[in-house]
Image (cartoon, rainbow, N blue to C red):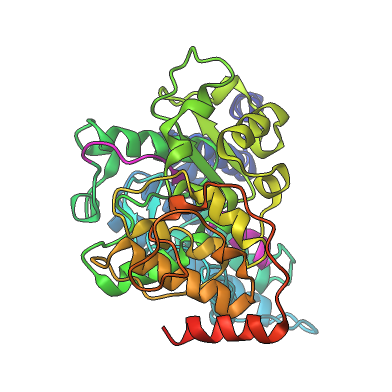
Amino acid sequence: MAIELYSEAIDLDSATDAIFAKRCKAKLEKMLCEEALLDAQKVIELNPSSSLGYQLKNATLYGLQRYDEADEAFQIMLSKLDKTLVTQAQEPLHRHVSLSDAERAVRKVVRAQLENTPPRLLNTATGCLCDREAQISAFKTTTEYMELLSSIIEHADLGIERVVATYFRYAMLSHRWSGKEPLLQEVQDKVVYELDSSGGVMKLQSFCKTARDAGYHWAWSDTCCIDKNNNVELQESVNAMFVWYSHSALTIIYLSDVIPTSKAGALASSAWTRRGWTVQEFLAPETVLFYQKDWTLYLDDRSPNHKHSDAIMQELGSATGIDARALVAFRPGMKDAREKLQWASMRVTTLQEDMAYSLFGIFGVHLPVNYGEKKQEALGRLLQEIVARSGDISALDWVGKPSELNSCLPADICSYKALPSTLPSLSEHQIQTSISSLRNV
């Protein structure tokens, strides 16, 4: 609609550089980069002394992946800004911010924004996997960045934090691994949209397109955004996963086994509800949307956040045993440890150790990740941490086979399926003695 209105204004001989600039921006939002480039050129012709035309030209060329030309336009834009700055500095009774000061101010906010985000993200516009420096470089080529610099120099308050936070919003994927998924080495230095569309690649492409169409520049998938061959990175990622999901602007939950014609109840039957990692992938984020096999919304629910859908939350609660309050507004920590262990008791993971690792974020703990250890060792370390830190001995209420490491602890998470018992009242001395024995294991 906006493009048509600006076109009508141009046809009425109102062809100012401002109108062409607005139509260019509208076309960029629709990813019509070739057409937007023509408008950017027109802005330059009508107002060659302004930096705006080159700013728009840079953005369109970047969208077309013509990076050398985009860089050239960027340099010209900076020179125009410098000339503007010199002119302004010569005006009496005004104090102006230098370009380098403006860049430094933006860089500081960007670094703070990226502290709790994944180090690698997929650029939904280009389909390229970007590390943190590449993400920042991409931001510097955008219209938002240029306008932000101009506003700082001219003392106009666009709100640095707001602009930066909006640009770096990202969507996370929650799904069930199946078949061959694309790993980092298969995606790095390639364009996701140009890969052979089969199996897990098609899922990744659809996820990126869905995130892009929802207005997000960045997207994250556990398949290709972590270097699983790097032990240090893998350790950091497992311990940071909950935080990453909680800071996402949107988590897209893909139900590969829910067909488009499904009725209410299909979510409860999905294998997604029985996987270990998906507990935190749902509880951590504030906003989630469920998608069916064909990437249409579950139950055709077009609300912006399915956590606000009573029907979907009731179905999910019945399927998982997680109470309604936790589903909508979960907070990590040691409180109600026995209940949280029960949530996980009916779930499975491909790697046995992951059952414990997937709960680190739920309990807010940071522990070493040691792939290759037995599942009872991983679970034992987690349970010892919970009891030792919280003093909550309800984690010792279980039914089943004891761990070979400590008979007070279960060998398997499924031992928490049974409803909790009414625990006997213990003295403070007895509780401290039990905790001390666990610390010394």
Q: Which residues are magenta?
A: 160-180
Q: Residue furthest front?
A: 424
Q: Quadrant of the N terminus?
A: top right
Q: Quadrant of the C terminus?
A: bottom left
Q: Residue at x 44, y 66 (%)?
A: 136
Q: How many marks?
A: 0
Q: Position of residue 320 (x, y in %)?
A: 56, 39
Q: Is residue 102 above or below residue 308?
A: below
Q: Residue at x 49, y 54 (%)?
A: 399
Q: Is residue 209 left or right of residue 389?
A: left
Say whether residue 129 is magenta: no
Residue sitting nearer the eye, 440 or 422? 422
Q: Position of residue 144 (x, y in %)?
A: 57, 56
Q: Is residue 294 left or right of residue 321?
A: left
Say whether residue 175 is magenta: yes
Q: Is residue 133 left or right of residue 279?
A: left
Q: Is residue 202 above or below residue 52?
A: above
